Image (cartoon, rainbow, N blue to C red):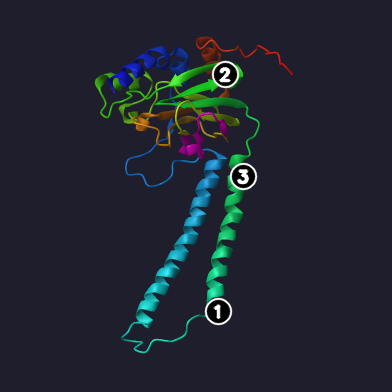
Amino acid sequence: MRFLKFFSFLATLISGTSVWSQSSLENLEIVGKPWAKGIDFQPPVTELARDLQWLDNFVFYIITVITLFVVGLLLYAAFRFSAKRNPEPASFTHNSPLEVAWTLIPVVILIFIGAFSVPVLFKQQIIPAGEVVIKATGNQWYWNYEYVDHDFDFDSFMIGAGENRMSPETEAQLIAAGYSKDEFLLATDTALVIPINKAVVVQVTGADVIHAWAMPAFGVKQDGVPGRLAQLWFKAEREGIYFGQCSELCGQSHAFMLITVKVVSQEVYDKWLNGAITEYAGTPRSTKVASLD
């Protein structure tokens, strides 16, 4: 744990206090965040997230009706066919129409649900051409982000990695990075920065074990498997800060493997990107890289 804390401190000095990582991204609203005693979804800020939350509510209504119906049948059977009211039980062994009904009705219900859920699944799985392409590599226990089109990358560590309780040093790092102490165990020293209303494709893989890149407010989650490159996509429609987490148990410090995404205007993104290219020695935006084809 001391090693993780020291490593996080070094990472903060190197990248988290970057002029371009902070000064051009100030005053962003925290939108996607878990709340104490919260029981609802985070605000959906992508089409995918809205579809998923609508589908969840849709299925919830269906299963609620089914549950109430089954409970009603159980109560009716317990009352109507108790030994007191039915001293001589019936001797029949089956009822063909009833058996056909309780087979076909669930099939129809499942087909009905599938007719709405399959399009939502396909919308997630059909990856569009990315206006921004980022490769996210899971490591034990931090994320590395590579902006593929500009040939630069950086690591993203939890602020106060390895700490279960916030120390004064960690609180100072949170404040320096533009957060409050309420974002302890949520914020990272360096955030993924993306422009609003642009199709973002995230290529997900793992460097050691299976990780998962998940962002609840975007409605996306994808396993990162070593040796494989999977993809997800989203188009964020609201500026702000969003918090996610690795969602695949990946080892001792899995709980400290956090994700921070900042959605900004195109103008702010362009300024950040130019600064990041300079800071991380990436390929300048005006440079044309020759193709081998």
Q: Residue at x 40, y 26 (%)?
A: 140
Q: Crowding near pointer 3: few (<14 within 10 Å), some, many (20+)?
A: few
Residue, disc 2: 270
Mark 2 is on which residue type? Asp
Q: Is residue 56 above or below residue 96?
A: above
Viewer-proximal residue among 209 and 51: 209
Pinpoint residue 82: horizontal percent, then vertical percent.
34, 82
Pinpoint residue 14: horizontal percent, then vertical percent.
41, 12
Viewer-proximal residue among 121 and 62: 121
Residue, disc 1: 96
* Circle nearer the viewer, 1 or 3: 1
* Circle nearer the viewer, 2 or 1: 1
Could you tell me if residue 5 is visible in this image? yes
Q: Pointers 2 and 1 in contact (CB under 8 A)?
A: no
Left or right, 187 with reference to 224: left
Residue numbers of the magenta segment: 213-231
Image quadrant where residue 164 sits: top left
Left or right, 114 with reference to 254: right
Could you say which disc has been placed on residue 173 in the image? Answer: none
User: Is residue 229 in the magenta section?
Assistant: yes
Viewer-proximal residue among 163 and 96: 96
Q: Residue at x 33, y 21 (%)?
A: 4
Mark 3 is on which residue type? Phe
